[in-house]
Amino acid sequence: MPLKIFGALLLSFAGFLGGSYFVRRLQARQRFFREMEAFLSALSTALRYQSADIFTLVNSSTELFCFSQAESGLSFSDCWNRRLPTLAKRWSLSAQDVVLLREFGAQLGATDAQGQLAHIECYQSLFQKQQREAEENLRGKAKLYQTLGLFTGVSAALMLL
């Protein structure tokens, strides 16, 4: 009997941890867009005051997208697109987020400095919209995920007993 109670407690705790995992994914997406906002601000400043290639400007602006010298034989757009699957997995980005990032990277470094600044300004508003959505998801779903996880674990534990 004590072993069943211990197992029931473990199942309840495992359910709670499962719900917490999904909350951490929501938090990661929200943090990504905060980092992206800081990156865009730093990148626009770097574009205004530095005359360097896009690889150097991006590397100096953030650690989200670090490009090595070995990749310099590829176009910036290709390097950017190679990073997206890793970013999407690490930061729990949605398919819509990845499409937006792909579109942003496709035009980055393709025009003169003024064109790049306009491009960044345009995408800043789009990324801010995604950040607001991520914050709303976190507020609305965090307690739900934890509660559902806990209740799933408790339900499984009751069936065990």
Image (cartoon, rainbow, N blue to C red):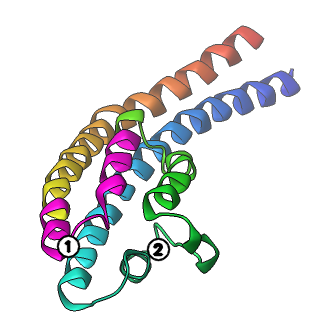
Please state if 76 lies on the left or on the right of 109 as rendered. right
User: Range of the magenta residues?
Assistant: 97-119
Q: Position of residue 132 (x, y in %)?
A: 20, 46
For the residue pair 157 and 135, the one nearer the viewer reads as 135
> Horizontal and vertical percent for residue 91?
48, 51
Q: Say which residue appears at 18% left-offset and 60% top-offset.
A: 119
Q: Quadrant of residue 34?
A: bottom left
Residue 35 versus residue 72: which sits nearer the camera? 72
**78 or 149: which is nearer to us?**
78
Q: In the rendered view, tell whether residue 100 sits above or below residue 151.
A: below
Q: Seen from this angle, which residue lies furthest top?
A: 159
Q: Main secondary structure of the magenta part?
A: helix
At x 43% / y 76%, what residue is drawn? 55
What residue sits right under mark 2 in the picture? 63
Count neighbours of disc 1 (C-alpha within 10 A) and say few if under 14, some if 14 to 19, many if 20 or more.
few
Q: Is residue 114 magenta?
A: yes
Q: Secondary structure at mark 2?
A: loop
Q: Which residue is mark 1?
A: 112
Secondary structure state at the residue bearing disc 1: loop
Q: Position of residue 118 (x, y in %)?
A: 12, 64
Image vertical order of residue 160 relative to residue 61, above or below: above
